[in-house]
Each structure stands twice: as C-alpha cells, then as structure tokens.
Image: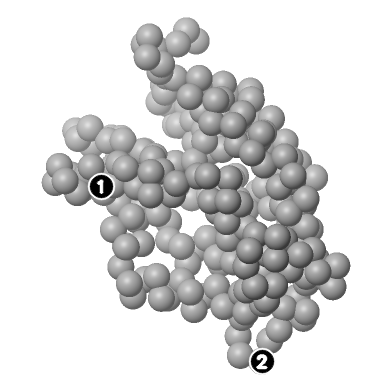
Amino acid sequence: LIFELDMANMHDPAVQQAVQVLGALPEGEILSDLLEPDTISQLRDYLAAAGLSRDAFDRLTPGMIFLSLSSLEATRSGARPDLGLEVRYYRKSVNDGKPSEGLETAASQLSMLSELDPDVVDALITSTIEDFETFPETMTALVAAWKTGSSSTITELVHEPYQDAPEFYEALLTKRNQDWIDDIEAALATEEDVMVLVGAAHHVGKDSVIELLKKRGLSPKQLSAAGPQPE
C-alpha cells in the first residue's frame, strides 16, 4: 500500500513531536507578525465558537493553522478520523502483514505551505473560515461524488475554489502530483499488486495523478461496483 504519508511513520511519537515543533512559531515571533489583524480576529472568533480557547492557535505557524482548520471543522461536523480510509487500510495492512509506505512527509507538507507568500496563506485562512458556513453540505456532496466517482463534481468542489489562488493550487496539487509520479510508476512496474491511496483532489484535473500516468503510457481505468467504466 502507498499512502500520501507514511502511516507507520506518523504513528511514531518522535515524528509527531517533530511535526509539532515544525508547526510552532519560532521563539520571539507572534501571530500578529504574520497575519492581518482581521484574520486573527476572525480566527479567534471561530475558535471560541468551536468551544476552544481564543488563543488556542496563537503559537502555530499560519501553515499549521490552515492545515488544522479543516480537520477541526470536519470533526465538529461529525467526521471520525479514526474511521478514515487511510487509517482503516493501514490497520488492515498491519494485520495482514502487508508493507506500506508514503509518498511524502508531514514535514514536506508544512514546508510547502511555509514557502507560499504570507498574503496567500492569510487569504486562505480567511476564505476557509468563511466557507465553513456551508461545510456540512459541501462534505456531504463531496462524499457522494467520491462514492459515485463523479470527477466533474469533485473538480467543482475541490479544484474550482482555488482557481483564484494559482500559487496555492500549484503547490498543493500540481507540484505534489509531479513529485509523486516517479514513485507511483516505479511501484506499478513491479510484479507486486499495488494499491495507492491519495486524496480525491489528486484524481481529477489536467495535472492529476491519473493524467500524469496516461502521459507515461499507462492506461488507468475508473472502476465501479459494476466493473470498468467506458472510455
């Protein structure tokens, strides 16, 4: 099994601690040095509404804040991270004695966000909080699209909101897909059966993992309970 992140590595307490360190502001740096006052106020109001301390994220980097917000809202909406697809398949791989690996590290994800223009991350935090008003409906639609394999709906829900932030789109999806594709192709070239589990956003779009595999001469086919879909 191949995941976005090495799941075994992510369960290592030392790795978890290292991620926390990477996601924390350096000593002497404060959030107001990096985010606009209105963004900080909006963030603190959201945290208070979520039942957390208003200053709960004050020592986090903007990138870590952005990564944490959607997870927090998903949990508030009833999502169960412990029942997520990656967790379920990782546990099954351990029980079945099957090897697994990751395409990137949590550190590389944080590094990707830290390299973005601060104004871009500031705007992303603001837009993310504002979008939480329709979060339950969006998640319901996204899950339904994932279950039915509706690429057009996934594109609409996941890709289109970031068309006004091309730098972020490039870093979050395009570049990561390109970084992964050599490892994915190499794994598929072996005689072993390989399963690659990555987020739905990486499956759709002109620069998706699927399209990159086609450019490498492979012929991925979308499957359903009824079998392969027509071209």
Residue placed at 68% from the left, 64% from the top?
47
Residue placed at 47% from the left, 7% from the top?
230
Does residue 178 appear in the picture of this structure? Answer: no
Residue placed at 63% from the left, 63% from the top?
51
Q: Decide if residue 199 is on the left or right side of residue 44.
A: left
Quadrant hosting residue 65? bottom right
Q: Are marks 2 and 1 in contact (CB under 8 Å)?
A: no
Q: What x and y, as percent, mark residue 114?
A: 63, 68
Label number found at residue 81: none
Q: Amino acid at mark 2?
A: Gly
Q: Residues within 10 Å of mark 2 (few under 14, many from 20)?
A: few
N-terminal of the pair, mark 2 or mark 1, is 2
Q: Nearer the viewer, residue 113 or 134?
A: 134
Q: Which residue is mark 1?
A: 91
Q: Decide if residue 64 is on the left or right side of residue 46.
A: left
Q: Residues within 10 Å of mark 1 (few under 14, many from 20)?
A: some
Kindly state the secondary structure of the residue where label 2 is placed: loop
Q: Amino acid at mark 1?
A: Arg
Image: 51 above or below 196: below
Q: Which residue is mark 2?
A: 28
Residue placed at 60% from the left, 36% from the top?
139
Q: Residue reaching furthest right?
A: 38
Quadrant hosting residue 118? bottom right
